[in-house]
Image (cartoon, grey):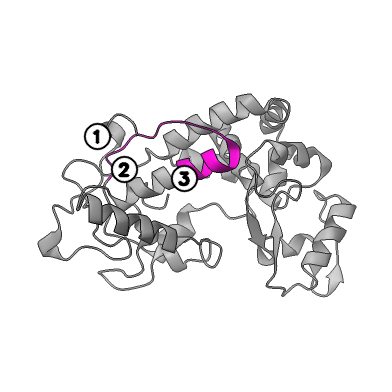
Amino acid sequence: IAHGCDASVLLATNPGGGRTERVAPPNNPSLRGFEVIDAAKAALERSCPRTVSCADILAFAARDSITLTGNVVYSVPAGRRDGSISREEDANNNLPPPTFTAQQLIDRFKNKTLTAEEMVLLSGAHTVGRSFCSSFVDRIWNGNTPIVDAGLSPSYAAQLRVLCPSNTSQATAPIDPGSPNVLDNNYYKLLPRGMGLFFSDNQLRVDGNLNVLVNRFAGNETLWKERFATAMVNMGRIQVQTGNCGQVRLNCNVVNPMSSSVSLAGSVEDDGLAATS
């Protein structure tokens, strides 16, 4: 969401030079699956050339992943176009790190037109996936000395030190050790037990207003899934480019040659998105 939903994170090169979002520390090496998007784009270019943008492919892929892992079915508006700018510093300045406090999280999401409740809803996606030890190692190691962060259960910290046996470990740990491959509400159930992997996860229960939401979603998975789907749609509308703005990339990794471009005007908001797909 550094530039909005314009697939800027997929660009491997920048027309103006410099490093892209793709290699920024918040994305690299944790962000993977580029080859899946490339395969989808290649198939679409064969069947309906210059029609479906990489930004829309990302939105559809996210929706399909949620359906496959959590049996959540929802429609996604179409019509996004692809941006032509991708800068490492934009990812560094826009993506919330795992060290953020509750207020920093609220402010960062507010800057992207998302509410505090939507921030808590979207944080529930941490129920799927893994994290490199470097994102939480300071909670379990102080140099070579074992420690237990105040927000961690001692037994959970001990489990994490087995997975990350030193403060320089390059290993990974499941963010939700109970059901790491299933999109469910277990993330919220873990937080009161001191099993939020990131410092920022624990902040959702430290803040009283956010903790009310944590408890609500922990007790009602159906409610969380319904609102999570809506929050995903809203996130997919952030600073989109539509109409004659942006382009439909022929290759998601690079900006089109000027002869292939339609327009590279500035972004517009979500009023240009088509119905749903």
- Residue for badge 2: 240
- Kindly tell me whether residue 113 is visible in this rendering: no
Distance CA(mark 2)–CA(mark 1): 8 Å
Distance CA(mark 2)–CA(mark 3): 16 Å
Expressed as whole percent of the image width and height from the top left, the position of residue 254 reads: 28, 66
Q: Amino acid at mark 3?
A: Ala
As drawn, is 198 to the left or to the right of 25? right
Mark 1 residue element: helix
As drawn, is 77 to the left or to the right of 15? right
Mark 1, Cα crowd under 10 Å, few <14 / some 14-19 / many 20+, is: some
Mark 2 residue element: loop
- Kindly give the residue lying farthest to the right in the view shown: 155
82 lies above or below 118: below
80 lies above or below 10: above
- Residue for badge 1: 272
| Position of the C terminus by quadrant | top left
Expressed as whole percent of the image width and height from the top left, the position of residue 271 reads: 27, 31
Instruction: Name which residue lies at 31% across and 38% down.
Output: 78
- Residue for badge 3: 62
